[in-house]
Structure formats: structure tokens, C-alpha cells
Amino acid sequence: MEGNESQRSLNRRGIFPRLVLALVAPVVFFLGVEGILWLAGVRPELDERDPFVGFVSDVPLFVEVVGPDGAVVHETARNKLTHFNRQQFPEQKGSGTFRIFCLGGSTTYGRPYDDTTSFCGWLREFLPVADPSRAWQVVNAGGISYASYRVAAVLEELAHYEPDLFIIYTGHNEFLEERTYREFLDDSEALRFARGMLSRTRTYSGLKRLVGSLTGRQAGPRVTREVFPEEVEAILDASVGPSAYERDDLLRERIVEEFRFNLNRMVDAAEAAGARVVLVTPASNLRHCRPFKSQSSEGLPLENAEAGQGLLRRSMEAVGAGELERALALLDRAIEIDGRFALLEFARGEVLYELGRYEESRGAFVAARDEDVCALRATTALQEVVHALAAERGVPLADFAKFLAGKTPNGIPGEELFLDHVHPTVEGHRLLALELIRVLEAQGIVRPTSEWGSGAIQRVTEAVEAGIDTAMHARALSNLARVIGWAGKHDEAYRLALAGLELAPDDGEALFMAAAKAFRVGRYEESVGFWRRALAAGRDDYETHNNLGNALSHVEAWAEAIGEYERAIEMDAKAAGAHYNLGLALLELGSNRRAEIQLREALRWEPGHAGAHHALGTCLVLQGRLSPGIESFSEALRLDPSRLAALVDRAEAWLDLGRHERAVADYREVLAIAPDWLQVLNNLAWILSTSDDAAVRDGAEALPLARRACALTEHGHLRSLNVLAAASAESGRFQDAAATTRLAIELAESKGREQRATELAARLALYEANRPYRARPD
């Protein structure tokens, strides 16, 4: 027994060292790996950026730094600088210091510029002049794309830094954050904590880099980013675009309630820290900001939605003709049909504005904003939450939206005070700072001296404006033009690009952006001039020459365009795009063999270029090589099934081969997707009416197609009338065929097309003899 007890004791003593070794060995191994990675220069991910973009509360915005004089200061953490301005303030607040933190999203940040010309920057300059009795510290804590959920987390951190006042401007990003960061919001706190701990290690950072290099993907958070030049991030945080948004009224209601909760949470945290709060009603561009995305009323039949769109198009034509009352009547009818299509309200607002009916115009613009499915401007419901909460909690309110309405023509804010949909101009920020000082004065926080007035304000304004880096502002406007264009708002992007160019008229990048945006809105001659100026300013590269070639092609300066494409190819011989563009230009000049060489060169460097396969098919058909051409069209369609023009071209090649049944199949496929394509309606109806192949002819199918074509052209299109007559005859409706042909003859004669009228007269004789027409495609 004693021997057994002794053996068990030895066994127990042996287990403990093994347990210690089992625990210590992984730790030693981990520390060894961390040391090796440290020597290799690998930094923890959290040192470089915040992978959780503000959703993990233990990743601080400000970190302690010891200055040269030994004093401890708080400065913006390096990993937060992608979303926040670089700011700094002392840990110890001096006697007589009043510390203000400004919170919110990109407006508070100062986008597209920076803190210097934000309302925070203006406050920093105005306050010491207005009230020199205090040492004012104004800290800009606005985070790009931050909505109230993350703003509240920032405030809770700042509550530890001896705040006296929080100015909160939030509301524009509520729907953006829901769409963009849903996966983060759904994660449990435990999961976020675990990820946060891992992101502090070099091992985790190294493994992510390794995985990224093996898979060809960037390691990072689950937020997709599209990187623009000069590290510009899109208005939509480069994560989701308007197409990701769908109308969801229940979601909107929930987001409004969450916004209310987060504002209350912020006021509670501020009061607990002994700080005061000023809320700002978020303002937006009503007059010059079209909705990002319009969507018809739920359950609206397709034909009703199409009718509404038709009325919208007709109203735009009426506006172009100067018939504003008629345009308004058409829009009113459209809104009766589809009352939630945001663009209808916006168009109505524009017409009412031109008619001088400004109150009604403002109401329509507000409705357009509130019905925008991609809600990137604070809605009326969110503004009302700010108002109600300020009243309920006794919190001072700076009603920026109302204030700006009083500062803008006819009470409808637009491009005079906004750069885009929500970001104020420098002047807009300055006005907000002055309005905030008025609110703070009413609260007894600011006690202006007798020196404070228009003269002092003007002196501060001139000093700030003199210090503005115009080159930086020009770049910022150009970059904003890029991202606004990315969001599909090309007219606004063009305006911003011109504003950037005005600040830096000889800057190659500003000229390039102005050229690109002019091209995008169809100002081709203007874009040619800008790109030529960009070349002269030193932007002599492949991209500029290629784009200049495109602009020259649009003004049909084919020889010059070819020269630019050839220069682009000299700079990058493997650029499929330039070879493709050169091939298209040569096709226009009828140089089909040379075009084929360039198109095959494009496919050599980019075999999956659907456009090049399509163009090559056209080139081959023009050379009479129909079967190879059809093969190229088919390959283009395999690569890009949405390329309907290739389907149309293939149908016409089938016709040239005499394969009417194959042409009919292709045309039917096109109309299933694009039912109003006039050329295809006429082509298909003609084949079904006149083919010499009885198995192909089908008057019952042809007649509604031909009628649709005539309806689209209001019976004023010669070919459509001719096709309708043929379809009527094939259906046995010879009197209708004859009547339509007489109408077509009158139209041809009125247009001076005598030969066409003679041809139609011969067909009229057929129809009057109760005989259908048989022919190859017209």
C-alpha cells in the first residue's frame, strides 16, 4: 500500500510540471513569433488603422502622448486618422479653460476639406475674439460616415477628458451606417472584444497579410472599399452604392427610434460628466440635389409605373419648350399615379421654383428628399427627433436647417451654401459657427465684449480665408467630384470639378477631373479643351491621351482621335482599352482591315473584353465574313449577356445569312428585356410580316409589335408606318394596310422623299388588291 501511495504521489508531482510546460510553451512560442515579427517590422493592425471603424469601444479615438516639454497631451490615434482630423489637447485643463468637443459625421469633420474651415475651426478662431475672458479649446471629433451609434461611443470616451460642452451635429448617416455596417452591428460584444484583442498582436497582422497575399485579397474588415486616387473614400464610405438601397418603411421607423435613443444616450453621458450640450438640426441641399435613388410605390402595377415615367419625360420636354404650366400639370398627374417616386417630386419642385411658387417648391423638394430611397440626407423625421429631444431635455438647439433657409434665396438652400448633398461650403460652415456663438451667448456661455461685431467678424474671416490652402481645396473638390460621380450624380460632379478648376486653373489633376466630368455630361468639345490643357500642364500619360481620343471621337474628329490612341499605345502597348478604342475609330473611317488588327490586339491582352469581341464581329461582318462575325457576337454575349446591341447585330447577321428563324429568336430575346427598342420592334415585325419563309411569318405576333412601334413614335415615323402596313396585310387587314400606307406616302412627300413615296405607292397597289408584301428585311 505504501508503495502505491508513493507512486501516486510521484505521478501527481509529475503532472504539475507537464501542465506548466503545456501552458508556458505556447506562450513562449507566441512571444517568440511576436519578437521575430517585431524585428521584421510588422506592426499590429490596430497601430495602423481601426479595423472595426469605431464599433469596438476599447479602441480609443485619443491616445496619451508626452510632448517635448514633458507635458502629457491627448492626440488623435494614428489608426483613426482615416476618419478623423488630427487634433490635440492637454491632459490637464488649465485654469479658465473652456473645453468644447464638436461631434458628428463628415460635416463636423469639414468634408471635403478638413478641420481648418469646418464650423469647429471657425469657432476656434471666433471665440477668443468674441469672448477673450476664457481660454477656449475647440476639439473637432467629427468622424467621416459616423452615425449616432458611433458618435455616442465617441462622446462616452470624451466624457473622461473634462468636457465643458458638446456640440452635436448628427443625422445624415443613419441609413448609411445601417446598410454599410450591418454585419458589425449584428456581432456580439464578445466577438468584437476577441477581434479587438487579436488586432493588437503582430501575429494576427502577419497572418492576415499572408492570407491576403495567398488569396490575392486585401486583409481587412468586412467593409468593401473602392480606393480612389489620393486615398479618397466615397461619400458612401466606399462600401455600398445607391443600388444597395431598397424602400423599407419599417426599417426607417426603427432607425428613427434608434436615433432618438442614441441622442438621449449622448445627453445622459454629457450630463453625467457635468458637461452641457448643444444640438444642431442637420441641414441639407434641397434646391440642387436630385434624389440618389427613386423607387415606385410598393405594389404599383408595372404599367402604372411606366405611365408615370412617361409623364415625367413629357414634362421635361415641356420644360425645354418653356411650357411650365403644362409641365406642372403632367407632373401632378404622374404623382397621382406614383406618389412615392422621389424624382417626380424633385422635378415638380424645380418647375414650381421657376414659376415663382416658392413655398410649394420647398415642400416638393422636401418630399423628394424624404422619399429618396438612398437616404443620405437627414429626413424630416430625423430633424423632428432633434427638435423634440431638445425640447424634452431642455437642451439648446441651433436650428441650422431653419437658419440656412433664412440665408438663401427664397428660403430653399442649394449650391450657394452646399458643395454637394450635405456638406456646406466654407461660408456655410462660417455661418454655422456664428449661429452657434449666438446660441452660446443666449445660454450665458459666451459673453461677447463690446468689440465683437461685424468688424471683428470680418477681420477673423479675412485672416482664416487668407490661410486657406487653395491647392488643397482644389484637390478636395476634384476628389469630391469623383466620388459624387461614382454615386451617379454627374451634373453635380461636373459643377464641383469646375469649382476645383477655378481654384487651380493650371493644375493637371484639376484639369483632368474637369475634362472627365465634362465628358460624362456630354460636353465633349469642352472636355477636349480641358484634356489638351491637362497635357500642357504636365499630365502627359496614357490615361490622358486615351481619354482625349475618346472625346475627339465623340466630336467625330477621327484622325485626331486615332493619333491620340496611337500615342497612348506607345506609352502602354499592352493596354487593351486603347487598342479597342483605336479599332472603333478605324471602323468609323471604314478601315476595316486595320480595325481588325487593333481589335485582335486588344483581345490578345484582354481575352475577356466583351466590347472588343462585339466590335470584331461588326468588323468581320462588314468584310462579308458573316459566320466568323456571328461567332464573335456570340462570344461577346457569353462574356456579357446584357450586351443587347450584340444580340441585335447577331440577328442582322443571321438575316444576311438567310437564317430568318435565328434572327427572330434573337430579336425576341432583346424585346423580352427592352420592349420599347424601336429598331427591334420594327425589324421583328417586318420579318414576321414579309419573310418568304411561311414557317417564320406570324401576322398575329407582328401586328401588336408594329402598333407598339407606331405608338412610341406617335405615328410620325415613316418606317414604323410601313411596317405596320405590312403587318396589317399579313394579318388579312388589307383596308388598314392601305390606309396606313396612304398616311406613310403623305409623310414621305412632306419630307421631300419622292422615291420613297413612289415605292410605297407600289405597295399600296398590292394591299388594295388584297395581297401581302413579301421581301427581305426592309
Image (cartoon, rainbow, N blue to C red):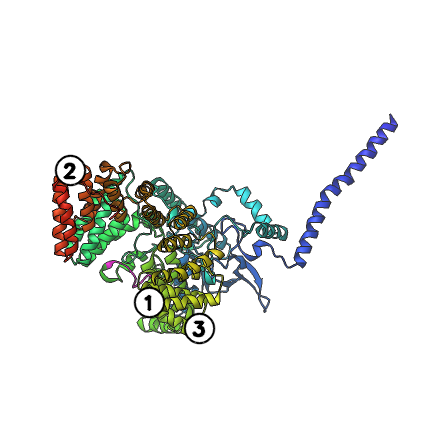
Q: Secondary structure at mark 1?
A: loop
Q: Is residue 459 left or right of residue 343?
A: right
Q: Position of residue 206 (x, y in %)?
A: 62, 52
| Residue 213 shows up from this direction | yes
Q: Position of residue 126 (x, y in %)?
A: 38, 68
Q: Position of residue 697 (x, y in %)?
A: 26, 38
Viewer-closest of 366 and 694 = 694
* Amino acid on which disc 2 is placed: Arg
Q: Which image quarter holds the N terminus?
A: top right
Viewer-closest of 705 and 488 = 705
Q: Secondary structure at mark 3?
A: loop
Q: Earlier in the sequence, mark 1 or mark 2?
A: 1
- Find out whether the residues at labels 2 and 3 contact each other: C-beta distance under 8 Å: no
**Residue at mark 1 to residue at mark 2: CA–CA distance:** 49 Å
Q: Nearer the viewer, mark 1 or mark 2?
A: 2
* Amino acid on which disc 3 is placed: Gly
Q: Earlier in the sequence, mark 1 or mark 3?
A: 3
Q: Position of residue 227 (x, y in %)?
A: 47, 57
Range of residues picked out in magenta: 411-419
Q: Magenta segment: does it hold 186? A: no
Q: Where 561 falls versus 670 (above or below)?
A: below
Q: Earlier in the sequence, mark 2 or mark 3?
A: 3
Instruction: Spot the residue most to the right.
Output: 3
* Amino acid on which disc 1 is placed: Ala
Residue highlighted by disc 1: 557
Residue highlighted by disc 2: 733
Residue highlighted by disc 3: 538
